[in-house]
């Protein structure tokens, strides 16, 4: 019943409880507070997104997107939060966790292909390619962890995995 990172701190003790309050505030403030802050700022300035002041301050969040998709970077932040933070607490170590990731990634891919938030050009293509690469990577992970006979083809699947992600890297460098 001691903190793994510091065995001097007893779990559920006074020092632990004080740290818990700070940890919960930080946990909520950083991954949810930053998207909330940027959403508020972009939405409140939505009619003057092309002004020099707003562009200099917040342009990095929306310049790559169509004017109607100025909040798309917030969507990206929340997508990444889900795929890196939320998913780890859903059914850890179970196949259903990978299935959820595959399905959610597929949903994100469909959304980006339908919405097309990026300005036309290589950035739009790169976004679609990376979303597709994430879907294929997670699908291959699902196959490797859940299909027993996939172990017989692990070299092939490894080559496909490296090829998909290597292709994305090559396209990124090319662009």
Image (cartoon, rainbow, N blue to C red):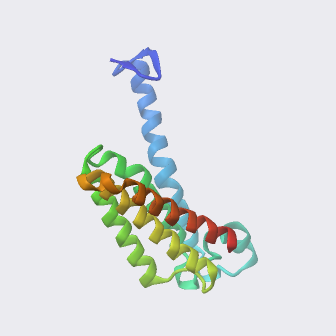
Horizontal and vertical percent position of residue 10:
38, 16
Most extreme residue toward the bottom is 120
Looking at the image, can residue 169 be seen?
Answer: yes
Horizontal and vertical percent position of residue 111:
40, 77
Which quadrant of the structure image shows residue 62?
Answer: bottom right
Horizontal and vertical percent position of residue 153:
34, 57
Residue at 35% in and 63% down: 139
Looking at the image, can residue 36 be seen?
Answer: no
Comparing 11 with 45, the one in front is: 11
- Left or right of residue 56, residue 108 in this image: left
On screen, 94 above or below 121? above
Horizontal and vertical percent position of residue 56:
74, 70
Comparing 99 with 148, the one in front is: 148
Which quadrant of the structure image shows residue 157?
Answer: bottom left
Residue at 70% in and 67% down: 57
For the N terminus, the image quarter is top left
Most extreme residue toward the top is 8
Residue at 36% in and 70% down: 106
On screen, 17 above or below 71? above
- Left or right of residue 166, residue 52 in this image: right
């Amino acid at each position: 019943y001691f903190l793994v990172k510091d065995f001097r701190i007893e779990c559920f003790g006074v020092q632990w409880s004080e740290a818990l309050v700070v940890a919960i505030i930080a946990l909520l403030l950083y991954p949810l507070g930053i998207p909330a802050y940027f959403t508020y700022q972009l939405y409140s300035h939505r009619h003057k997104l092309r002004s020099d002041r707003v562009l200099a301050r917040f342009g990095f969040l929306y310049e790559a997107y169509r004017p109607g998709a100025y909040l798309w970077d917030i969507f990206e932040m929340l997508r990444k939060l889900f795929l890196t933070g939320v998913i780890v607490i859903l059914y850890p170590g179970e196949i259903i966790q990978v299935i959820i990731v595959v399905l959610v990634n597929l949903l994100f891919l469909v959304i980006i292909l339908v919405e097309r938030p990026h300005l036309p050009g290589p950035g739009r293509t790169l976004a679609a390619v990376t979303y597709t690469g994430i879907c294929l990577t997670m699908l291959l992970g699902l196959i490797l962890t859940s299909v027993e006979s996939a172990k017989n083809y692990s070299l092939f699947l490894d080559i496909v995995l490296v090829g998909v992600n290597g292709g994305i890297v090559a396209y990124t460098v090319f662009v």
